[in-house]
Each structure stands twice: as structure tokens, then as C-alpha cells.
Image (cartoon, rainbow, N blue to C red):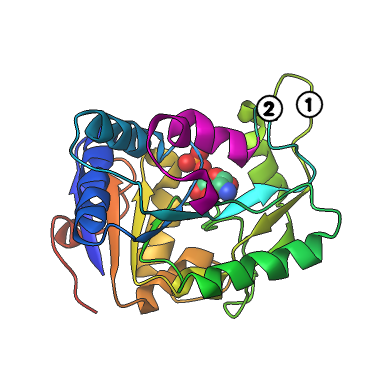
Amino acid sequence: MQIRVVGEPSSVADGAAREVIRQVTERPDSVLGLATGATPEGLYRELVKAYRRGRVSFARVSTFNLDEYVGLPAGHPASYHHYMERHLLAYVDVDPLHVHIPNGQAPDVDQECRRYEEQLRRAGYVDLQILGLGRNGHIGFNEPGTPFGSLTHRVALAETTREANRVHFPAGQEPPREAITMGIRSIMQARRILVLATGEAKAEAVAAAVLGPVTEQVPASILQLHPSVTWWLDEAAASLLEKDLRQVDRAL
Ligand SMILES: N[C@@H]1[C@@H](O)[C@H](O)[C@@H](COP(=O)(O)O)O[C@@H]1O
């Protein structure tokens, strides 16, 4: 596990963008695993900038998103389909046929989960996975208690997660109660993982995931067992890590 602590959220975005660009340059047909939320927005801005400057092309890349709300149409402003268009896909040369996001409006949600997992398997799983971190240690929408062996599945969202994500919904509109998410096992298949976390509100979840026991109560703690993970943290998100863990590469 590597831990990079940088001063500002913008440096987290820069560092992660450099890694994504390197991956796509070395392997133009990479499979990228994409995350949503406020945290990776800066990363996507940097990727759009790099594309516009001709420093990277996504023409042969495939993408798989981690999750989507159940019941929201793709065009809903809070859907993750809409998020991805708004922050990345509309501005770069990714082939729309190579973009994969779970269909939250599928008539049979369980079948959609199986279909998505199968698509992921056929693509050979993810080469470089971007992850954000929920305040309760969730990754994707895998809430505390999710079995480590889980594949893409339907989840009931924790009340705290619905509260945290309420800001993305129009006033008066309730966030959905369910979502489709890649499972912990699906995420762990990725060959390399970048976890991004910024701000003090993430400090406890970061410390529990990095320093605590590996437990299903903290979904991100499983990342301690992955062979190639880099945590990109700003000072605030890293504030509860021991000083000697800062700026060092920790090989497990
Ligand atoms: N499903 C997403 C997660 O993938 C994301 O990591 C988390 C944190 O979001 P933010 O970056 O806005 O704090 O939010 C949602 O729950």
C-alpha cells in the first residue's frame, strides 16, 4: 500500500490524473473503473484539460462505473449517468459503446446486477480503479456489513449515506433508498486501485481503513489486502494517520 499525502485537494486531483494518464498512455485499451461523488471531480477536470491539450486520448479505453441509484432515469441530474456525462464523458473521446454504468431503471434489478458483473468479467476486469470513500468507510455503495465476497448487487443505502448525498438532489426530492453497486470482490479484481479522499470529514474513515483491522464493518479496510493500492489524501483527510505514515510508501 502506498500513501501519498499532499497539501491540497487540487494536488490529489493532479497526482491521480498523472497516474490515469500514465496508465492510458502505456496501455491505450485500458479498462478504467470510475467513481462518482465530489472527490473525483477535480481528477476528471484534469483529465479533460489533458485531453484538450492533446496529452491523452481515451479513444480505445473502456470504462466501468462503480454504481448507480435504483429508479433514477439516466437524465436525472443526480444520477451517476448524468454525473459522468457532466464531468468527463461529454468532453473526451471515449467511445460511448465502451462506457458501462449500471442501469438503475432496469425492470429486473437483480438480473441487471448479474448482467453488469458478466460484462465486467468479459472485459477482463478493471486495470485502474478510481475509488472515493464514504464517511462510514464505504466504497462504491458497499455499506458496512457487506460481505467481502460480494459481486455486483443491489443495496439498501445507509441513512447516513442518503443524508450525505442529499445535496446532489433537487430541493424536496428524496434520495433513492436503493442502489446497484459493484461488489467488494468485483472491486478487488482490479489490477491497480487509487483511493482519493479529501477533507476532515473523511479522516476517521481513512484512519480506520488504513490502520484498523480488516473487517466488513469498514468496507475500505479490505484494500489493505490488495497488492497495488495508492491512497491519495490531502492533509485534512490524513490528519488522523500517524505522522510516520506520512509521505512514505508502505509496502505490505
Ligand atoms: N457511491 C458514492 C461513492 O462512490 C463515493 O465515494 C461517496 C463519497 O462521495 P464524496 O466524494 O462526495 O464524499 O459517495 C457516494 O456514496
Label disc, if present, on residue 224 of the rendered structure: none
Towards the viewer: 160 or 92: 92
Q: How far apart in space, not on screen, are marks 2 and 1 (Cα)?
A: 6 Å
Place of residue 8 in the rendered image (x, y in percent of width and height, measured from the top left): 24, 34
147 in magenta: no
Label disc, if present, on residue 173 of the rendered structure: 1
| Residue position for label 2 | 169
Place of residue 135 in the rendered image (x, y in percent of width and height, measured from the top left): 52, 48
Which of the 4 image quadrants contains residue 245? bottom left
Q: Residue placed at 30% from the left, 78% from the top?
A: 227
Question: Is residue 135 visible to the viewer in this orientation of the structure?
Answer: no
Say which quadrant the N terminus sits in: bottom left
Residues drawn in magenta = 79-98
Place of residue 242 in the rendered image (x, y in percent of width and height, measured from the top left): 23, 59
Amino acid of disc 2:
Phe
**Left or right, residue 221 beside residue 183:** left
Question: Is residue 236 visible to the viewer in this orientation of the structure?
Answer: yes
**Left or right, residue 50 beside residue 150:** left
**Left or right, residue 115 beside residue 23:** right
86 in magenta: yes
Give the farthest residue toward the right.
107
Amino acid of disc 1:
Gln
Q: Residue placed at 28% from the left, 39% from the top?
A: 13
In this view, 150 is above or below 38: below
**Answer yes or no: do the residues labelled 2 and 1 have beta carbons within 8 Å?**
yes
Say which quadrant the C terminus sits in: bottom left
